[in-house]
Image (cartoon, grey):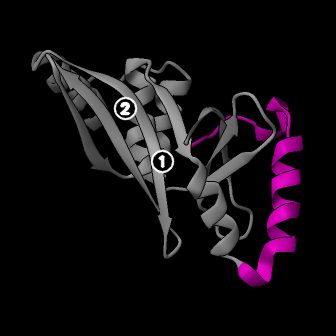
Amino acid sequence: MEVEMMIKGLMIDPITNMPIVVLREGEGRRVLPIWVGVFEANAIALQMENVETPRPMTHDLLKSIISGLRADVERVVVSELRDNTFYARIHLRSGREDLAIDARPSDAIALALRVGARIYVEECVFEAALEETPGETADLTRLQKWLEGLDEEQLGKYKM
């Protein structure tokens, strides 16, 4: 089952100094932190802050190519968590054909922001997140509660 999510914000992991995209369940309290690369976080942040670049970024180019092929991004789905790595699919509709394209979640999210597509997470990803950290379930629960309680000011704006 796919659960609709919204981007709660971007933040920096205070331990690793890596960016985190924080997704929040649209109709619930669950959050899902996804660690991403600096360049990918920048692509997401630029779109979240409505910053226009003088030349197209990779995700802008991808948006143009999809549009030029007369296809639409229906949704993006964070579909799997395996060996501490998240996987995603970009669901496209081209004419009568539906396509599911493998992608990194950060790229799928950056594209979704650009085209106004909805973001989903498979229910099994939430379950796998708990299984991936068997000895750290209490820590994960504390992290989840901390992330759920963050307000917009605490998340702040992601700065490069």
- The 10 Å Cα crowd at callout 2, few under 14, some 14 to 19, many 20 or more, is many
Quadrant of the frame with the C terminus? top right
Distance (Cα) linking label 2 and label 1 = 13 Å
Displayed quadrant of residue 131? bottom right
- Left or right of residue 55: residue 94: left
- Element type where label 1 sits in the image: strand
- Comparing 15 with 35, the one in front is 35
Residue 120 is inside the magenta segment: no
Residue type, numbered disc 2: Leu
- The 10 Å Cα crowd at callout 1, few under 14, some 14 to 19, many 20 or more, is many
- Residue 131 shows in the view: yes
Identify whether 32 is placed above or below 7: below
Query: Which portion, as a residue range, is magenta?
Result: 134-160
Pointers 2 and 1 in contact (CB under 8 A)?
Answer: no
- Element type where label 2 sits in the image: helix
Determine which residue is flagged by label 2. Answer: 111
Q: Residue furthest bottom?
A: 135
- Comparing 160 with 118, the one in front is 118
Q: Residue at x 77, y 39 (%)?
A: 155
Determine which residue is flagged by label 1. Answer: 78
- Count of labels shown? 2
Displayed quadrant of residue 22? top right
Q: Residue furthest front?
A: 1
Q: Main secondary structure of the magenta part?
A: helix
Residue 18: percent from left, percent from top: 59, 61
- Left or right of residue 34: residue 68: left
- Comparing 54 with 103, the one in front is 103
Q: Residue at x 84, y 43 (%)?
A: 148
